[in-house]
Image: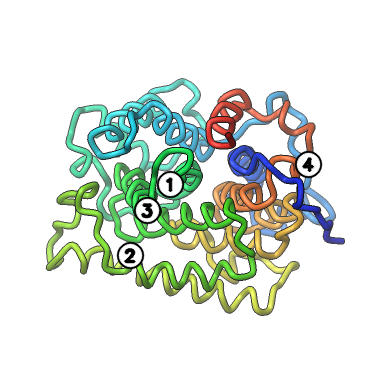
């Protein structure tokens, strides 16, 4: 039975978002690469609903890289620009890559790009230009928390930063657009947008951004064989995202709380599918965050990244108090998560 949550007193939405991402990541970590039948056999009768009993409860590279982005944002001088943010992001990504804790089966795109960044290559040469893996957007949640009030960032500034942090490792235009959409969804939910309107609002947003290339941030990234202009480069990314957003719009009209979400909106290995499948799981249970990340974890695709995004969306909408209180003391990196949450909750 779906729980009903009173949102009238909910605060700490930034903390709820960041901790929610970590909770979803941890819950989905043990189900990645398994079929739904295998997951249900291992976690009867309906899949995992409680965090592991280990202390701390381990997360994956998804949360680690989200922390890297968040801490780079706190380190960088404001107002944000490529001059103030490039080095903190580069340093944070390289430090993550070289850390002894980078032992959670990270994606090869991130590893390769971070190795190139460590060599001092310009970021637009270090990036893996044809990759649109979900590593571009499973870490972008902190960017969605930036507002004019807490950091002087406009909506267009937030869009540019979301795309830029993606571009350091994933240079495909769809990776950029999907990261932008993920940050936008979080910003909408932080602001109290009705979740049921989110698919249509994101479709409208994608159309509004379709030909906008953030040249001050992305520089020569667009220059590829057969690409005639910056606009035609980024339009390809938005068009691919619009295809899956339409899939999401149709899916939420006839929600299926029993089936494998990956068969409905995509397996999540690529950025745009991770976005919409994470959103779909959240929209199945917009008032019940634990059921939402459970649904995401019981999936046949990139379960930890999907559940990480689902948890970020749910926490941004419902706030920190919607999560089981006992989880906060047990999750890995809780001090770092709390520090970031406090920075943007105030």
Residue 237: % across, % down: 33, 65
Tell me whether circle 1 and circle 2 mark residues in contact (CB < 8 Å). no
Tell me whether circle 4 and circle 3 mark residues in contact (CB < 8 Å). no
User: Disc 4 and disc 1: Cα gap in Å?
Assistant: 25 Å
Residue 308: % across, % down: 58, 47
- Identify the residue under disc 4: 50
- Identify the residue under disc 1: 135
User: Disc 1 and disc 2: Cα gap in Å?
Assistant: 16 Å
Name the residue: 35% across, 61% down.
Answer: 174
Tell me which label, 1 or 2, sits earlier in the chain: 1
Name the residue: 21% across, 66% down.
Answer: 231
Tell me which label, 3 or 2, sits earlier in the chain: 3
Q: Of tags 1 and 2, which is closer to the observer?
A: 2
Q: Which mark is residue 237?
A: 2
- Identify the residue under disc 3: 159
Q: Relative to 35, is 124 on the left or the right?
A: left
- For the residue pair 244 and 157, the one nearer the viewer reads as 157
Q: Of tags 2 and 4, which is closer to the observer?
A: 2
User: Disc 2 and disc 4: Cα gap in Å?
Assistant: 36 Å
Q: Residue furthest right?
A: 1
Q: Of tags 4 and 3, which is closer to the observer?
A: 3
All told, the count of numbered labels is 4
Q: Relative to 82, is 271 on the left or the right?
A: right
Tell me which label, 2 or 4, sits earlier in the chain: 4
Q: Which mark is residue 295?
A: none
């Amino acid at each position: 039975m779906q729980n009903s949550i009173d949102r009238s007193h909910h605060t700490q939405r930034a903390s709820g978002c960041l901790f929610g991402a970590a909770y979803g990541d941890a819950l989905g970590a043990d189900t990645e690469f398994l079929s739904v039948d295998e997951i249900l056999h291992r976690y009867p009768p309906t899949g995992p609903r409680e965090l592991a009993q280990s202390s701390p409860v381990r997360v994956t590279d998804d949360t680690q890289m989200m922390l890297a982005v968040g801490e780079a944002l706190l380190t960088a001088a404001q107002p944000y620009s490529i001059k103030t943010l490039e080095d903190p992001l580069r340093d944070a990504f390289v430090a993550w890559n070289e850390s002894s804790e980078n032992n959670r089966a990270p994606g090869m795109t991130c590893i390769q790009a971070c190795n190139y960044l460590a060599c001092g290559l310009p970021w637009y040469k270090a990036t893996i230009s044809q990759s649109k893996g979900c590593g571009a957007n499973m870490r972008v949640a902190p960017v969605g928390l930036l507002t004019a009030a807490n950091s002087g960032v406009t909506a267009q500034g937030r869009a540019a930063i979301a795309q830029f942090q993606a571009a350091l490792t994933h240079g495909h235009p769809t990776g950029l657009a999907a990261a932008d959409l993920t940050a936008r969804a979080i910003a909408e939910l932080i602001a109290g947008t009705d979740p049921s309107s989110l698919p249509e609002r994101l479709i409208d947003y994608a159309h509004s951004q379709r030909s906008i290339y953030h040249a001050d941030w992305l520089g020569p990234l667009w220059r590829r064989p057969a690409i005639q202009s910056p606009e035609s480069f980024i339009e390809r990314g938005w068009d691919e995202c619009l295809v899956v957003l339409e899939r999401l719009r149709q899916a939420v009209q006839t929600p299926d709380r029993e089936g494998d979400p990956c068969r409905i909106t995509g397996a999540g290995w690529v950025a745009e599918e991770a976005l919409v499948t994470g959103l779909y799981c959240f929209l199945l249970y917009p008032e019940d965050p634990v059921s939402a990340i459970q649904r995401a974890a019981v999936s046949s695709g990139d379960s930890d990244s999907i559940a990480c995004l689902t948890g970020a969306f749910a926490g941004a909408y419902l706030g920190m108090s919607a999560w089981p209180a006992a989880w906060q003391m047990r999750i890995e990196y809780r001090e770092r998560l709390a520090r970031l949450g406090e920075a943007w909750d105030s």
